[in-house]
Image (cartoon, helix red, strand yellow):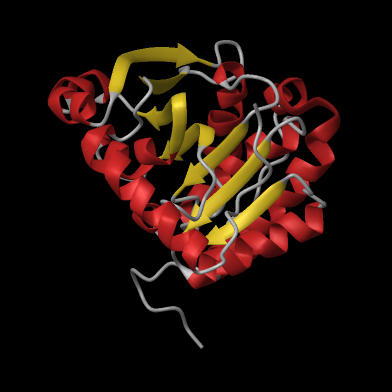
């Protein structure tokens, strides 16, 4: 059949080889990361989790941009990746940090199915896939030390979902873009009501990604989510105990 004018032939975008920066950032985990990249470029695109135009820039824009979160996540803590989607940033973080206990929280079935397949294929025993919305997890998910997120929502809305999942003195770390400072200013009142006591905007990943990744770090005090969510959390935990449901999301850490 003759190709009509103005209609380019369809072709599968090609995944480029891992750049030198990936060897430095992922180290011994690189073979597993390369397998994950192949899954994103193939099944991830076919299932609509990733746009085909993202495949050529998968390493720089997605995998390396996410793995640098390791710089700001403490050792041996629990992490919840809110709105995990195709596993970004949770899976790159898990691949280089076996010391973490990570929950990938995602409401859509097709995404959680993909995430579970990836976790099993890569043997990520320290990662749990949980289907649900963040606002439904109070009393179900054990409060975590760190909440991560990437390109999920504006900061004020994102904080409303993620901050209540933190344990006291925990931290939400959100990958953001050039508007991070503006988002922090716009969300200042909302963050205060949610119990956030300190918010900073930082550049991370120098020497790995260019430009460096921008993160917003929101640290909470003794009442994550503020007074309103404290009452909801107590109510949810009582309901969970009454229904005989055990909290999910990994073992508690002191």
- Does residue 148 appear in this view? yes
- Does residue 12 appear in this view? no
User: Image point 38% across, 23% down: which residue?
Assistant: 222
Q: Residue 184 at what x, y percent from top left?
A: 22, 22
Q: Residue 157 at what x, y percent from top left?
A: 24, 42
User: Image point 28% across, 26% down: which residue?
Assistant: 195
The answer to which of 96 and 130 lies nearer the viewer is 130
The answer to which of 187 and 121 lies nearer the viewer is 187
Side of 242 where 102 appears, left or right? right
The answer to which of 25 and 199 lies nearer the viewer is 199
Q: Residue 221 at what x, y percent from top left?
A: 36, 20
Total numbered circles: 0
The answer to which of 113 and 53 lies nearer the viewer is 113
User: Image point 62% across, 23% down: which residue?
Assistant: 70
Side of 41 where 239 appears, left or right? left
Q: Is residue 153 above or below residue 222?
A: below
User: Image point 64% across, 28% down: which residue?
Assistant: 77
Q: In this view, does 17 lie above or below 244?
A: above
| Res 38 → quadrant | bottom right
Location of the C terminus by quadrant is top right
Q: In this view, does 229 lie above or below 239?
A: above
């Amino acid at each position: 059949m003759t190709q009509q004018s103005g209609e380019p032939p369809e072709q599968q975008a090609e995944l480029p080889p891992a750049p030198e920066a990936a060897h430095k950032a992922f180290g011994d985990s690189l073979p597993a990361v390369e397998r994950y990249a192949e899954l994103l470029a193939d099944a991830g695109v076919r299932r609509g989790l990733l746009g085909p135009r993202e495949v050529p820039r998968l390493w720089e824009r997605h995998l390396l941009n996410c793995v640098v979160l390791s710089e700001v996540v403490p050792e041996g803590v629990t992490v919840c990746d809110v709105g995990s989607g195709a596993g970004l940033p949770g899976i790159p973080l898990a691949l280089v940090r076996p010391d973490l206990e990570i929950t990938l929280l995602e409401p859509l079935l097709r995404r959680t199915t993909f995430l579970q397949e990836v976790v099993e294929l890569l043997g990520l025993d320290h990662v749990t896939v949980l289907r649900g919305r963040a606002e439904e997890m109070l009393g179900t998910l054990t409060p975590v030390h760190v909440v991560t997120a990437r390109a999920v929502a504006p900061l004020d809305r994102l904080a409303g979902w993620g901050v209540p999942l933190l344990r006291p003195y925990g931290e939400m770390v959100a990958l953001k873009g050039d508007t991070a400072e503006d988002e922090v200013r716009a969300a200042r009142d909302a963050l205060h009501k949610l119990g956030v006591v300190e918010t900073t905007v930082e550049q991370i990943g120098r020497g790995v990604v260019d430009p460096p990744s921008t993160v917003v770090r929101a640290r909470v005090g003794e009442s994550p989510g503020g007074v309103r969510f404290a009452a909801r959390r107590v109510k949810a935990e009582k309901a969970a105990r009454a229904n005989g449901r055990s909290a999910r999301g990994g073992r508690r850490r002191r």
